[in-house]
Image (cartoon, rainbow, N blue to C red):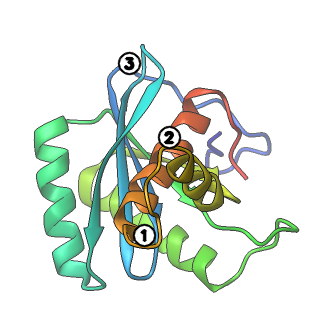
């Protein structure tokens, strides 16, 4: 949901059919997933493994140029009780940077437990998630994007 300036009630953001990129923001890595609004199906895409902002955005620039998304979805890390913490603030700042840089709507989705769900899913597939942290991040981005497609609401 989006809140317009001066409005007292959230208004539904207009959903434009097209490709959507989803992100699992982290201090070290950013997991990325891709999906199509009409199909409502998310797939893990890649993990950007760098703490350097310029490196991260160079990689995202390439993904945006290749996939031409109509919108972006970002997992918002919250504490178990729903409260915000330092990573929440960093993720919100990242969302503002994405929106400003690409001129695309950025939807925030509660990402609590997405990494745990990703680890569990990978374990079920026989992937040693302790050895492949990047796989967890891309799978977590897939879960975040799938939650968006399934109608999860913004925190």
The image position of residue 70, as x and y in percent, is: 32, 32
In the figure, is residue 6 to the left or right of 97? Answer: right
Instruction: Give how far across and how far down residue 149 sits, in percent.
Output: 55, 28
Instruction: Name the front one of labels 1 and 2.
Output: 2
Helix, strand or loop at mark 3: loop
Residue lying at 25% horizontally and 52% vertically, measured from the top left: 102
* Disc 1: CA contacts within 10 A as few (<14), some (14-19) or many (>=20): some
Q: Furthest-front residue in view?
A: 126
Q: Residue at x 29, y 49 (%)?
A: 103
Mark closer to the chain start, 1 or 3: 3
Earlier-in-chain disc, 3 versus 2: 3
The residue wearing badge 3 is: 17
The residue at the far top in this view is 38
| Residue at (23% x, 72% y) in the render | 56
Question: Dots 1 and 3: beta carbons under 8 Å?
Answer: no
Question: Which picture quadrant has residue 50?
Answer: bottom left
C-alpha span from label 1 to label 2: 17 Å
SS class, disc 1: helix
| Residue occupying the far right of the picture | 81
Gap between marks 3 and 2, in whole Å?
A: 15 Å
* Quadrant of the frame with the N terminus: top right
Q: Are marks 1 and 2 in contact (CB under 8 Å)?
A: no
Verify CB contact (< 8 Å) between mark 3 and mark 2. no
Looking at the image, is 137 positioned above or below residue 109?
below
Q: Is residue 145 above or below residue 14?
A: below
Q: What residue lies at 69% left-to-right and 59% top-to-bottom? A: 113
Category of crowding for the residue at label 3, using alpha-carbon neighbours closer than 10 angstroms: few (below 14), some (14–19), many (at least 20) = some
Residue receiving disc 2 = 145
The disc placed on residue 94 is 1
Secondary structure beneath dot 2 equals helix
């Amino acid at each position: 949901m989006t809140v317009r300036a001066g409005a007292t009630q959230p208004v539904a953001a207009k959903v434009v059919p097209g490709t959507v990129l989803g992100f699992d923001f982290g201090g070290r890595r950013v997991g990325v997933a891709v999906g199509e609004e009409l199909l409502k199906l998310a797939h893990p895409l890649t993990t950007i493994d760098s703490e350097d902002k310029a490196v991260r955005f160079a990689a995202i620039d390439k993904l945006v140029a290749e996939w031409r998304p109509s919108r972006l979805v970002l997992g918002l890390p919250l504490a178990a009780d729903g409260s915000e913490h330092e990573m929440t603030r960093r993720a919100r700042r990242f969302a503002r940077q994405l929106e400003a840089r690409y001129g695309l709507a950025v939807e925030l989705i509660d990402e609590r437990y997405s990494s745990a769900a990703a680890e569990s899913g990978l374990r079920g597939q026989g992937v040693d998630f302790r050895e492949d942290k990047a796989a967890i991040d891309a799978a977590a981005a897939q879960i975040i994007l799938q939650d968006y497609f399934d109608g999860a609401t913004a925190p």
